[in-house]
C-alpha cells in the first residue's frame, strides 16, 4: 500500500506501512514468526523466484512484519524503498554491496562511529574494498581523495561522539559532481531531526538498534533508497545496470526503475549475505517508531539542559554539543537541523583519563553501557571502550580523546540527570 505523501510525520510514524491484518483484523502488526510461505501453485512459485511477481518466499528475503518496518522507515525518510537487516553494521555492508567491487573505494568522513571506522578500515579490506578517510569540512579534500575507482561517499548526519554536524547539502553536491551516491548514516539524528534525502543524499542507513527502536531491546539496521540516483549515467554500477546471471540476465535498473537498488538489496544482498532482520526485532522496532517524535523532542530538550549545566561547571573542561552556542557547528546545526542537534555529546573532565574512569564508576542513574539512543541516560568512556581499537590520532579525530566522556541523554527528568552527574563529578575529581 502506498502511503499518502501528505500525511504528517507523527501520523506516518504510527501508520506508514501498516494495515489491519487481512487474516484476523488484528490492529497491531502481528509478529509473523515463520520462515516460509505456501505457494498458491507451481506457477506462482516460479513467478516469485523469477522476480516477475512480488511476494513472500522465505524470511531470509522478506517477511510481512519486517516489510511493515521497511515501508515505515522509507516513509519517514522520504525514500522510495528500504531494506531492513540484522544490525547497523550489516546495513553499512548491505548499502555498499551493490556499489563496490575489489579495487573500488569509498570516501568516508573521519568523524564516524568508532565501530564504523574499524569496519571500513579493517574488515572491508578483506573484500578488496578500500576506504579513504577525509575531513568532510574540507570539501576540496573530498574531491582530491576521489579517483576513477571511487564508488560512494559516506558520512553521518550528526556524528557520534564528537558533536559534529555534517553539511549534507554541500557534501551531496561534491558526490554528484563525482558521479557517485552520497550515503548518510542518520542513526544519531533520526528522520525526526534530519531528513538527508531532502538535503541531497541518495541513500540513508540506520542502526535501528538506537532511537528507532528506542528502548534498548532490539538490534537492527535499515538501508533506505531515495530512488533519485541514476545508476546507468556513469557506467560505474554494473550490478544495477548489467544483466544479472542469477536471474536469467535481468537488469535491475531497467526492470525496477527507481526501486532497482532496493530490489537488489533484497534479491541479491539479503539472499547471499543473509543478514536478515528477525520478525520479533522488527515488531519491537515498529513499537519504538510509533513514539519517535515525542521521544526525540524530549531527548533534545534534556540534552540542552544537561549540556548547558555541564558547560558552566568548573570541573568540566569543555562540552562538544552542536546544540550549544559554543560549538563550532552550532550555526550549521541551527540552519540544517532546526529541531535540535540530537542528544549525544561528549565532555572533557578535568583530571583526564583517571577522572573519567572514576566518573563512570560513580554514576547511579546513568548506565555505563556501549549502547546509545535508549530512553535511559547512558554514559561511556569511549577511549577505554568503543574507540579503544583506534589509534590515538583516530581517537582524537573521532572526538574520543582519553579525557572525554560520552553521554546519551535519555527522557528522564533533567533535574535528576544533573544531580546524578553532579555527585559523580564530585567523586571523580575529589
Ligand atoms: C550503533 C551505530 C552503528 C552500528 O549499529 P549496530 O546496530 O550496533 O550494528 C552505526 N552507526 C552509528 C552512528 C551507530 O550509533
Image (spheres, rainbow, N blue to C red):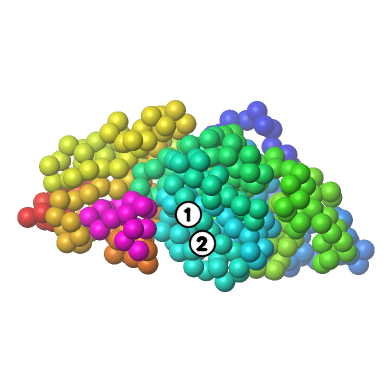
Q: Quadrant of the N terminus?
A: top right
The percent position of residue 166, horizontal first and vertical second, equals: 46, 40
Residue sitting at x 64%, y 40%: 176
Instruction: Pick out the residue farthest to the right.
Output: 43
Q: Which residue is mark 1?
A: 133
Measuring from the top left, give residue 345's x and y in whole percent: 33, 46
Q: Splitting the image into 4 quarters, where does residue 242 fall?
A: bottom right
Q: Residues within 10 Å of mark 1 (few under 14, many from 20)?
A: many
Residue 394 in view in this figure: yes
Question: How many numbered dots are placed on residues in this image?
Answer: 2
Report crowding for label 2: few under 14, some 14 to 19, many 20 or more residues within 10 A (C-alpha).
Answer: many
| Magenta segment includes 399 | yes
Contact between marks 1 and 2 (CB within 8 A): the answer is yes
Give the residue at x 71% y 66%: 271
Say whether residue 141 is left or right of residue 282.
Answer: left
Residue range (magenta): 391-410
Name the element at disc 2.
helix
Q: Nearer the viewer, residue 23 or 333?
A: 333
| Residue lying at 74% horizontally and 47% vertically, measured from the top left | 234
Identify the mark nearer the N-term, 1 or 2: 2
Residue 38 is marked as none
The residue under label 2 is: 120
Amino acid at each position: 500500500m502506498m502511503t499518502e505523501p501528505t500525511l504528517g510525520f507523527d501520523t506516518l510514524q504510527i501508520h506508514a506501512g501498516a494495515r489491519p491484518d487481512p487474516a484476523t483484523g488484528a490492529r497491531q502488526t502481528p509478529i509473523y514468526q515463520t520462515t516460509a510461505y505456501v505457494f498458491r501453485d507451481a506457477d506462482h512459485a516460479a513467478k516469485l523466484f523469477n522476480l516477475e511477481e512480488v511476494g513472500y518466499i522465505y524470511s531470509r528475503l522478506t517477511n510481512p512484519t519486517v516489510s511493515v518496518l521497511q515501508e515505515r522507515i522509507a516513509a519517514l525518510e522520504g525514500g522510495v524503498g528500504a531494506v531492513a537487516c540484522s544490525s547497523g553494521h550489516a546495513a553499512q555492508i548491505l548499502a555498499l554491496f551493490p556499489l563496490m567491487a575489489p579495487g573500488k573505494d569509498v570516501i568516508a568522513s573521519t568523524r564516524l562511529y568508532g565501530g564504523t571506522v574499524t569496519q571500513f578500515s579493517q574488515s572491508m579490506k578483506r573484500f578488496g574494498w578500500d576506504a579513504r578517510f577525509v575531513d568532510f569540512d574540507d570539501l576540496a579534500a573530498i574531491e582530491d581523495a576521489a579517483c576513477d575507482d571511487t564508488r560512494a561517499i559516506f558520512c553521518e548526519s550528526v556524528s557520534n561522539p564528537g558533536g559534529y554536524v555534517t553539511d549534507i547539502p554541500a557534501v551531496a553536491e561534491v558526490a554528484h559532481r563525482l558521479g557517485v551516491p552520497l550515503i548518510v548514516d542518520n542513526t544519531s539524528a533520526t528522520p525526526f531531526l534530519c531528513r538527508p534525502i531532502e538535503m541531497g543524499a541518495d541513500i540513508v542507513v540506520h542502526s535501528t538498534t538506537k532511537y528507532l527502536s528506542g528502548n534498548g531491546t532490539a538490534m537492527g539496521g535499515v538501508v533506505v533508497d531515495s530512488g533519485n540516483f541514476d545508476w546507468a549515467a556513469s557506467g560505474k554500477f554494473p550490478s544495477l545496470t548489467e544483466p544479472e546471471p542469477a536471474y536469467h540476465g535481468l537488469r535491475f535498473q531497467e526492470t525496477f526503475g527507481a526501486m532497482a537498488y532496493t530490489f537488489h538489496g533484497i534479491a541479491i544482498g539479503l539472499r547471499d549475505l543473509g543478514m536478515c532482520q528477525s520478525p520479533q526485532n522488527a515488531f519491537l522496532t515498529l513499537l519504538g517508531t510509533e513514539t519517535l517524535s515525542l521521544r526525540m523532542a524530549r531527548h533534545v530538550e534534556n540534552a540542552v539542559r544537561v549540556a548547558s549545566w555541564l558547560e558552566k561547571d568548573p570541573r568540566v573542561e569543555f562540552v562538544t554539543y552542536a546544540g550549544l552556542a559554543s560549538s563550532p557547528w552550532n550555526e550549521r546545526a541551527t540552519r540544517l537541523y532546526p529541531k535540535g542537534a540530537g542528544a549525544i555529546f561528549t565532555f572533557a573532565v578535568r583530571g583526564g583519563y583517571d577522572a573519567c574512569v572514576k566518573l563512570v564508576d560513580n554514576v547511579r542513574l546513568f548506565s555505563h553501557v556501549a549502547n546509545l539512543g535508549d530512553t535511559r541516560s547512558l554514559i561511556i568512556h569511549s577511549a577505554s571502550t568503543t574507540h579503544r581499537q583506534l589509534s590515538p590520532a583516530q581517537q582524537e579525530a573521532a572526538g574520543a580523546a582519553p579525557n572525554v566522556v560520552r553521554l546519551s541523554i535519555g527522557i528522564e527528568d533533567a533535574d535528576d540527570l544533573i544531580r546524578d552527574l553532579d555527585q559523580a563529578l564530585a567523586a571523580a575529581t575529589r
